[in-house]
Image: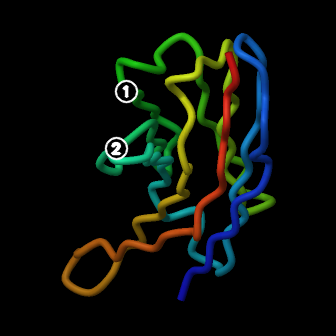
Amino acid sequence: QVQLVESGGGLVQSGGSLRLSCAASGSIFRQSAMAWYRQAPGKDRDLVATITSGGSTNYADSVKGRFTISRDNAKNTVYLQMNNLKPEDTAVYYCNAVVPGPLNVGMNYWGKGVLVTVSS
C-alpha cells in the first residue's frame, strides 16, 4: 500500500511563495500518476495539478503560470511550487496518487492534507 505525507504548508502573504512536498512510501512510486488537489472552506475538492509517471503535467486554469508540479522518483516525492500566491489559493492541499492495480484499475491514495493560508 501507498502512504502519502504532505509538508510545507503554512501562512504566507499575498504574492509570496511556498513549496509543498509529498513523500510517498512504497516501491511503485515510479508507476504512479500524482496530483495535488485543494479544498477551500465551503467548496468542493478541486484538482490543482497532475503529473504522470512519464513527467507530463497538467494544471487547473486558476493556477497556470503560477504553480509547478514536479517529481523526484529517486526520493519518492512530488512537489508543488506555488508562486505569486493569492488569498483565493487559501485551502487545504491534498496529495493524491493513482497506483496501477488489478485489471488495470487505478487505486487512489490520499494524504491527510496540509493547510495553506494566504493573507492579503
User: Which residue is found at the position 45% from the left and 73% from the top?
Assistant: 109
Instruction: Return the x and y of residue 37 as percentages of the image width and height.
Output: 45, 48
Earlier sequence position, callout 2 versus callout 1: 2
Measure the alpha-carbon separation of dots 2 and 1: 9 Å
Asked whether, in this view, residue 14 is left or right of residue 100, the answer is right
Of residues 103 and 98, the one drawn nearer to the viewer in this rendering: 98
User: Which residue is found at the position 46% from the left and 34% from the top?
Assistant: 56
Question: On the rendered image, what quadrant is the C terminus found in?
Answer: top right
| Tag 2 residue | 46
Of circles 2 and 1, which is in front? 2
Of residues 108 and 103, the one drawn nearer to the viewer in this rendering: 108
Which residue type does callout 2 highlight? Asp
Name the secondary structure under disc 1. Answer: loop
Residue 30, placed above or below residue 55: below
Instruction: Return the x and y of residue 50 as percentages of the image width and height.
Output: 44, 41
> Quadrant location of residue 102?
bottom left
User: Which residue is found at the position 70% from the left and 60% from the top?
Assistant: 6
Asked whether, in this view, residue 60 is left or right of residue 103, the answer is right
Tell me the crowding category of disc 1: few under 14, some 14 to 19, or many 20 or more residues within 10 angstroms, Cα based.
few
| Tag 1 residue | 60
Asked whether, in this view, residue 92 is left or right of residue 100, the answer is right
Instruction: Return the x and y of residue 77 as percentages of the image width and height.
Output: 72, 57
Instruction: Return the x and y of residue 105 as percentages of the image width and height.
Output: 23, 75
Residue found at the very far left of the displayed protein: 103
> Quadrant location of residue 116?
top right
**Marks 2 and 1: CB-CB under 8 Å?**
yes
Which residue type does callout 1 highlight? Ala
Of residues 57 and 68, the one drawn nearer to the viewer in this rendering: 68
User: Which residue is found at the position 48% from the left and 20% from the top?
Assistant: 63
Residue 85, placed above or below residue 114: above
